[in-house]
């Protein structure tokens, strides 16, 4: 027999007792996200929800999304603040689902770390659970994996996945979008969770510490950079219920759906026709994805005030406005494509919820010579994320809030 000391899981760096302690610390927060649809409790191999509500739909479609938070996590680790990063995760996942009009029905999370520190893991999951409760989406499962020797003890990364449901006849998107539709921009809470590799590089070259007091923000630099992503799911679902989806201009699928590639169809006068979650790639890239080919959304850059944090990134990093609009949301986190007669109702409803909103553009047919007619500073953006869809024309100049 070998004279080497006896080994076990703990000796290899995995502390299962710490994992159990973390579960106990987070259990109440997770349970508070559970509603009447949740079948069974926590701790099982699989989370389950009662899907009986789907029986009342003509053709229920499941919508799913998965994402992480990116390198914003490095700031949370540097500041030792871990109870806000979970909201970023929920926003990145669930607000992609609502874009098609789907209501989220469940979410799960995954945390990989070098060492399980129960209080830290519990803080992360408590943040996830708090955000899930806000958007009325049960957090029904998760996993914490300890990776000693692969990740440093204080390192962690998080990911999440969610599933939602929408009746096929209520799906939002290009098949409802037409000429004359109006773009309503809904304000972001700040940087959200995209572009942080750029932001962290700017922080490095600025020479400032995260604890620096910033008069322009009214708080420390770290607090501003760690501001959680705004959650849009409940707000958007309430808007859809209030004003409807507007009629389909063309079939959602099948050979006839190619008709949506041709301009000349005017959008319905009322309803929310499409939504665009402004994440990586900025406003132009993300809005273009929900428009039919042959239409262009003219966006006025001066239609909203750009929050101070974006101007800080621009100044301290010597970053061009063009580079900013290709990577950050610049103050608009969600865009609703709306029928002209519903614009006032949509704007007023969003503002009544405590979030700023306003008209930022309108849709028209794309001219054959559009690219050759661009004035100085104007940009045409299309063909992003591999989607052969619409086009966005960014014009005018940004103004600060």
Image (cartoon, grey):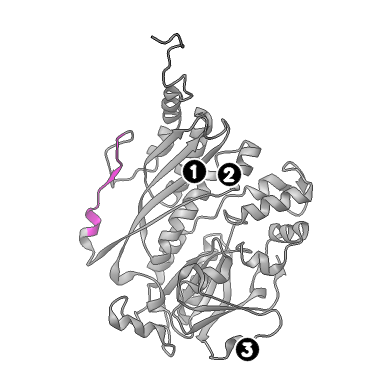
Q: Could you tell me which secondary element the residue under label 2 belongs to?
A: helix
| Residue nearer the viewer, 272 or 69 | 69
Residue 372's disc is 3
Residue 218 seen in render: no
| Mark nearer the N terminus (1 vs 2) | 2
- Looking at the image, tell me whether mark 3 or mark 2 is earlier in sequence order: 2
Kindly identify which numbered label has been placed on residue 73. 2
Q: Residue 324 at what x, y percent from top left?
A: 66, 64
**Relative horizontal placement of residue 352, taking residue 376 as reference (left or right):** left
x%, y% of residue 288? 51, 74
C-alpha separation, residue under disc 3 versus residue under disc 1: 45 Å
Seen at 58% across and 60% down, the residue is 188
Residues tagged 3 and 1 counted as in contact (Cβ below 8 A):
no
Q: Quadrant of the C terminus?
A: bottom right
Question: In the structure shown, which secondary structural element does the residue marked by tag 3 occupy?
Answer: helix
Q: Can the viewer see residue 320?
A: yes
The residue located at (51%, 35%) in the rendering is 113
Q: Which residues are magenta?
A: 44-54
Q: Marks 2 and 3: in contact by CB < 8 Å?
A: no
The residue beneath circle 1 is 158
Q: Are marks 1 and 2 in contact (CB under 8 Å)?
A: yes
In this rendered view, identify the residue nearer to me: 138 or 295: 295
Gap in angstroms between the C-alphas marked 3 and 2: 43 Å
Residue 49 painted magenta = yes
């Amino acid at each position: 027999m070998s004279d080497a000391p006896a080994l076990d899981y703990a000796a290899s760096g995995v502390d299962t007792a710490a994992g159990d302690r973390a579960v106990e610390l987070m259990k109440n927060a997770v349970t508070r996200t559970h509603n009447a649809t949740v079948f069974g409790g926590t701790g099982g191999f699989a989370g389950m929800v009662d899907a009986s509500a789907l029986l009342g739909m003509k053709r229920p479609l499941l919508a799913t999304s998965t994402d992480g938070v990116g390198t914003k996590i490095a700031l949370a680790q540097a500041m030792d603040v871990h109870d806000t990063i979970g909201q970023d995760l929920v926003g990145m996942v669930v607000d992609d689902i609502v874009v098609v009009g789907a209501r989220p029905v469940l979410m799960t999370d995954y945390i990989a770390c070098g060492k399980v520190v129960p209080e830290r893991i519990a803080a992360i999951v408590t943040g996830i659970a708090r955000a899930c409760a806000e958007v009325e989406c049960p957090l029904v499962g998760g996993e914490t994996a300890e990776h000693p020797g692969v990740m440093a003890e204080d390192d962690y990364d998080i990911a999440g996945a969610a599933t939602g449901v929408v009746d096929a006849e209520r799906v939002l998107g290009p098949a409802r979008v037409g000429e004359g539709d109006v773009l309503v921009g809904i304000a972001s809470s700040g940087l959200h969770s995209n572009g942080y590799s750029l932001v962290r590089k700017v922080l490095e070259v600025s020479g400032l510490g995260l604890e620096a007091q910033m008069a322009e923000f009214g708080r420390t630099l770290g607090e501003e950079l760690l501001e959680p992503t705004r959650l849009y799911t409940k707000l958007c679902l309430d808007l859809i219920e209030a004003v409807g989806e507007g009629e389909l201009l063309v079939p959602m699928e099948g050979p006839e759906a190619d008709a949506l590639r041709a301009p000349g169809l005017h959008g319905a006068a009322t309803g929310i026709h499409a939504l665009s979650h402004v994440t990586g790639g900025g406003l132009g890239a993300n809005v273009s994805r929900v428009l039919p080919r042959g239409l262009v959304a003219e966006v006025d850059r001066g239609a909203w005030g750009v929050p101070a944090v974006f101007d800080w990134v621009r100044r301290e990093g010597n970053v061009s406005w063009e580079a900013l609009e290709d990577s950050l949301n610049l103050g608009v986190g969600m865009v609703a494509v709306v029928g002209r007669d519903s614009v006032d109702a949509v704007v007023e409803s969003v503002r009544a919820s405590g979030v700023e909103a306003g008209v930022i553009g309108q849709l028209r047919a794309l001219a054959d010579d559009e690219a050759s007619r661009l004035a100085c500073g104007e940009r045409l953006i299309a063909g992003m994320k591999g989607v052969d869809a619409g086009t966005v024309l960014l014009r005018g100049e940004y103004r600060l809030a």
